[in-house]
Image: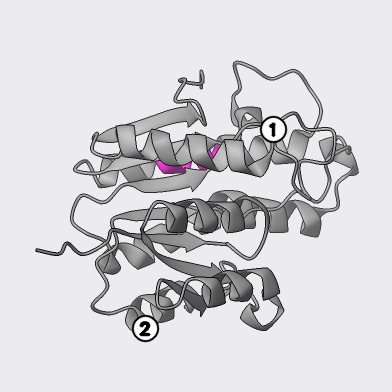
Amino acid sequence: MTTTPATILLIGASRGLGLGLAEEYLARGWQVVATARDPVRATRLAALAEAHPGRLRIEALDVMAPGDAAALAERLAGTHADVLFVVAGRSGFSDAPIHQVPQDGAALEFLTNSYAPPVVAEALLPVLKSQAPIVLMTSILGSIANNAGGMELYRASKAALNMLGSSFALRHPDRAVLLMHPGWVRTEMGGSSAPLDIATSVRGMADVIAARGADRGVAYLDYTGATIPW
């Protein structure tokens, strides 16, 4: 008797933590559907697909393009994913206080980090199993209780994502909505001085999803499963 492997849908997996999550879930025997804004340039993701024939499907998705997520849902008709993880985000003005950030730059960061993840998740609900958890990549920097200053725009965008993720959970009470902080990780965004490597972070996040994915309601967690104060 054979069982069908579980499937994760990763939004934003061409590099960094998204790519690391694809690697981790493939190692766990899952099927992976991974998106990239420009699949032609996602050479590392393509190499991973070649190394795992038939187990990694790459799709194009720009989270900021109206209608792109709905079009992806149509292309994935018949898919019944067990987990949706929206990884995509940006940090373009990390050192600037908010009054020094140009208006268009602030709008782009808020739309990418706060608005796009729940909007994309909503559009992709038709390709998820009925109680599949929704995981949104946030940050401990979105915690108002832990605000230590700096990275004002990024902090605010992640705090807004936490609020919208909580609202999403209220509208979908039968699902877990996990707002996931990956830790401070050595990626292009996290920088070379970060204490965590990608493998440690993604392994922890996958374990947390396995432990908490059957819950209902919203949780703000780090990669170890610890709860973060709002």
- In the picture, measured across the screen, residue 142 lies left or right of residue 86, that is right
Q: Nearer the viewer, residue 22 or 67?
A: 22
Q: Is residue 161 magenta?
A: yes
Q: Which residues are magenta?
A: 160-165
Percent of width and height locating residue 41: 71, 78
Tell me which residue sits at (51%, 18%) in the image: 229
Give the distance between the C-alpha atoms of the residues marked 2 and 1, in whole angstroms.
Answer: 36 Å
- In the picture, measured across the screen, residue 23 lies left or right of residue 188, that is left
Q: Secondary structure at mark 1?
A: loop
Q: Is residue 203 magenta?
A: no
- Quarter of the picture containing the N terminus is bottom left
Percent of width and height locating residue 17: 62, 50
- Picture quadrant of residue 141: top right
- In the picture, measured across the screen, residue 217 lies left or right of residue 150, that is left
Q: Nearer the viewer, residue 8 or 158?
A: 8
Q: Would residue 166 be visible to someone looking at this image?
A: no
Reading the image, the residue beneath label 2 is: 75
Circle 1: residue type: Leu
- Picture quadrant of residue 146: top right
Q: Would residue 82 be visible to someone looking at this image?
A: yes
Q: What's the coloring here?
A: one colour
Q: Give the answer, above or below, for where 194 lies relative to 45.
A: above
Crowding at dot 1, Cα within 10 Å, few <14 / some 14-19 / many 20+, comes out as some
Circle 2: residue type: Arg
Furthest residue in direction front, as rendered: 1
Reading the image, the residue beneath label 1 is: 196
